[in-house]
Image (spheres, rainbow, N blue to C red):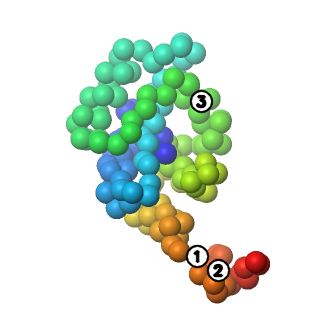
Amino acid sequence: MDLWATWCGHCVDELPQLLELQKKYPDDVVPIAVNVDHDVEDAVPSKEVREAVLATLNELKMETTNVICSTPFETMLDRYELFSLPAAIVFDRDGQKLAVFEGDLNYEKQVFPLIARQLAPASDGPAEVDGEAESKTQ
């Protein structure tokens, strides 16, 4: 899940990396772009917010699942314990949060390796955890 805003230059610059994630793992990953431009307690984002978001998505040719969040920006930051945008949150197949990446995102160096490790078949030998071997119990 990639949280971004139209007013965040770094967000718009890194958003196409979400497309690369979709291309690299089309059958294993469901990338979702969540726009957090909405910053008031109104029930739905304004027409101006929706138009700005759609214009950006069209310009970038974003062919992923895109959501305009109706939860105010600050609430989203608090909910996911974020300090900055852009932010990528990676969940496993069970919906458990695996990792959070904020700020200067590089999917190829940060997100892709995490996904590759998650998708790697389990081995019968010791598993690598932070550079150390860990025994599996059966």
Instruction: Report helix, strand or loop for mark 1.
Output: loop
* Horizontal and vertical percent position of residue 30: 44, 49
Cα separation, mark 1 vs mark 3, equals 39 Å
SS type, badge 3: helix
Q: Mark 2 points at which residue?
A: 127
Question: In the rendered image, which residue does mark 1 sit on?
Answer: 122
**What x and y, as percent, mark residue 60?**
25, 41
| Residue 126 in which image quadrant | bottom right
Tell me, yes or no, whether the two marked residues, 2 and 1, touch with CB atoms within 8 Å: yes
Number of marks present in the image shown: 3
Q: Which residue in the protein does label 3 denote? A: 74
Image check: 78 left or right of 4? Answer: right
Q: Nearer the viewer, residue 25 or 40?
A: 25
> Could you tell me if the residues under marks 1 and 3 are in contact, i.e. CB atoms within 8 Å?
no
Instruction: Spot the residue most to the front.
Output: 138
Give the residue type that dot 1 points to.
Ala
Q: Is residue 61 visible?
A: yes
Q: If you read the primary sequence from the N terminus, does the residue marked by circle 1 or circle 3 appear first? A: 3
Image point (51%, 72%), residue name: 120
The correct choice, above or below, for 61 with respect to 116 in the image is above
